[in-house]
Amino acid sequence: MKFEKKQVVWAYIFLLPSLIGIAVFYVIPYIMCVYSSFVSKGSFAGLDNYIKLFQNKAFLYALRNTVIFTAVAIPLLMIISFLIAKFLASFKKISAFFRSAYLMPIVIPAASLIYVWQLLFDDYGVVNNLLSSLGIDTVQFFSSGFSMVMIIIIYIWKNCGFCVILFTAGLANLPKSVHESAYLEGAGGFKTTIKITLPLITPTTFFVFLMAVINSFRMFRESFSLFGTYPNENIYFLQNFINNNYNNFNYPQLSSSAIVMSLIFIGLMLIFFLYERKSDYLE
């Protein structure tokens, strides 16, 4: 027992630097943010900051766009990544090359990506010049509904390779005997994928979903670089709203909007975690 207690003590000692870092840079700032969301002009304001927040049209635009982006981009990313991983699993000789190629967008600097997109889709860019030469009306990609499509495409392009790697690892660990039995019993490829493959890789899918949600909230850098501090209302996200309130020193609105954003993230994780716990992939 003394030896086990010593092991526990040493484990906590080695964990202590990480725990201190998490407390200083995450836990304490979050508690301060929660406190600030209930304070206005140095006095307790209750839920007034949240009431004013949901009466703010800019926040409602940001919330709507964030929900639309999350609801569209994340499922598309997961579906495309799974299909690519499934395709690569059938060609083992070339799969290593393509897996490496799909990781290239992760290491490409964001500034280079933004420069290329501006060169292509600016009002006087390559695409609009091509449309003009063909006698077709030009499109304002950066100030119309196409801006949301552009952000979704950038998000999928940038994160698809990493998700493909994760799905490939999950598919590689599946027992071949299960699929062989299904094929012998007459099950087709689509039915096997829906009934066997997807339930068996539920833990992998959960992790991919987790990373996809985290990376979706990190798209502010690309959005800010392409569309500026105050983009059009189609791509004005919660991150833009938080950043603008930070620049304007409106800390009550900043704190309350940050708490709402974190609650959305926690809610998504909780729903998927409960689904993952209830799934019968181990049976």
Image: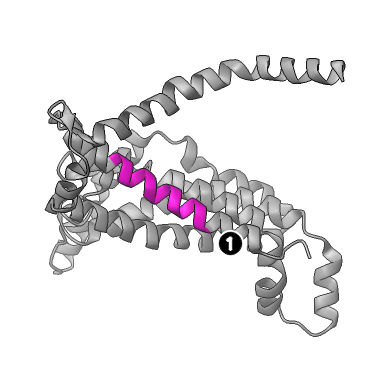
Please tell me whether residue 264 belongs to the stretch shown in magenta: yes
**Boundaries of the magenta span:** 258-271
Estimate the x, y position of residue 176 in percent, counting from the top left.
83, 64
Q: Nearer the viewer, residue 216 or 3?
A: 3
Q: Nearer the viewer, residue 247 or 257?
A: 257
Q: Nearer the viewer, residue 151 or 210?
A: 210
Tell me where residue 37 sits by quadrant: top left
**With 29 as the anchor, is 188 left or right in this view?**
right
Q: What count of labels does the image hold? A: 1
Image quadrant where one finds the N terminus:
top right
Q: The disc labelled 1 sits on which kind of residue? A: Tyr
Q: Residue at x 83, y 21 (%)?
A: 4
Determine crowd level at label 1: few under 14, some 14-19, many 20+ residues with C-alpha closer than 10 A: few
Q: Tell which residue pokes out farthest to the bottom in this image.
A: 186
Q: From where the camera sits, is residue 125 visible?
A: no
Q: Residue at x 25, y 40 (%)?
A: 256
- Disc 1 target residue: 275
Q: Main secondary structure of the magenta part?
A: helix
**With 247 as the anchor, is 167 left or right in this view?**
right
Q: Is residue 59 above or below residue 176?
A: above
Secondary structure of residue under mark 1? helix
Estimate the x, y position of residue 42 in percent, counting from the top left.
15, 25
